Amino acid sequence: MARGEHRAIVALTAAVVVGVSGYYIYRQHFSPEARARREAAEKAAEAAFEQEQIRLKIELARLAAEGNLASSSAEGGIVSLTPERCGGTTSKYTWTQDEREIVVRFQLDSELHSRDCEVNIATKSLNVVVDGVTLLEGELTRRVSKEDSYWELEEDGSTSKKKILSITLTKLRRTYAKFHWPSVCLGEPETDVSSFGDPVVGVNGQNPSNGSMEAAMEEVEAMRRDA
């Protein structure tokens, strides 16, 4: 084969390869079908993103409605507040709180019974006497619902073989984040509730236009006045 013919065949082959490659690239990236595929994929990705955002907003609203979220600048964003974190420990008792209740727990000797316990819960005061000894007495930090508050004596459940006197105080008004109670009674050791930051208020994420936002903000304003 003459050198010229060989060069012609090589050039022709290269042209065919380039042409086929160009056609393939065109079909894959620039043809109407390719554009349609890209647009469909983009729409699917956008729809998936929007659905995930809706799910996260609903979940955030649910958690916020339960009263366990706060916006803390000290911790760099939204934090989840546990009942234990919102309470505290003194030399005589431990206490926890959520948005609706205060729970005070005293550890007692195992031989004590309910008849040895005298617990008087009033709207604004609490008096706890066990076996003739006053364990807690004073004015509550805020008001409670006397009818919905109660106490019980139960086994500790640990190897210490102690009993737990548990007093549940139902708040007259719910509280969130920095508006939580700083202590059970006035003058008792306090928890720094101001460090919790502002409450993250939850509304119905599926139907936010039903006045729930206005009601939530009114509730926060009432907490501000109480504090």
Image (cartoon, rainbow, N blue to C red):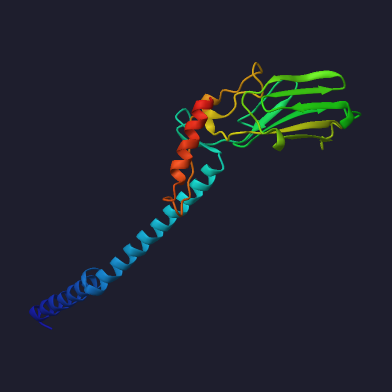
Quarter-of-image position of residue 183: top right
Task: Determine if residue 26 is in view.
Answer: yes
Quadrant (top left, top right, bottom left, bottom right) of the N terminus: bottom left
Task: Determine if residue 113 is in view.
Answer: no
| Residue that lies at the very extreme toward the right in this rendered image | 111
Q: Residue at x 77, y 26 (%)?
A: 120
| Residue that lies at the very extreme toward the left in this rendered image | 4
Q: Is residue 19 left or right of residue 60?
A: left
Q: Is residue 190 left or right of residue 201?
A: right
Q: Is residue 183 above or below residue 10?
A: above
Q: In this view, does 186 lie to the left or right of 56?
A: right
| Residue that lies at the very extreme toward the top in this rendered image | 187
Q: Is residue 154 left or right of residue 179?
A: right
Q: Is residue 152 above or below residue 126?
A: below
**How many numbered marks appear?**
0
| Residue that lies at the very extreme toward the bottom in this rendered image | 1
The residue lying toward the viewer, choosing from 124 and 167, is: 124
The residue lying toward the viewer, choosing from 48 and 93, is: 93
- Measured from the top left, where is residue 223 in percent x and y? 52, 30
Quarter-of-image position of residue 82: top right
- Measured from the top left, where is residue 107 in percent x and y? 80, 27
The residue lying toward the viewer, choosing from 87 and 21, is: 87
Q: Residue at x 76, y 32 (%)?
A: 166
- Measured from the top left, where is residue 129 in percent x and y? 81, 22
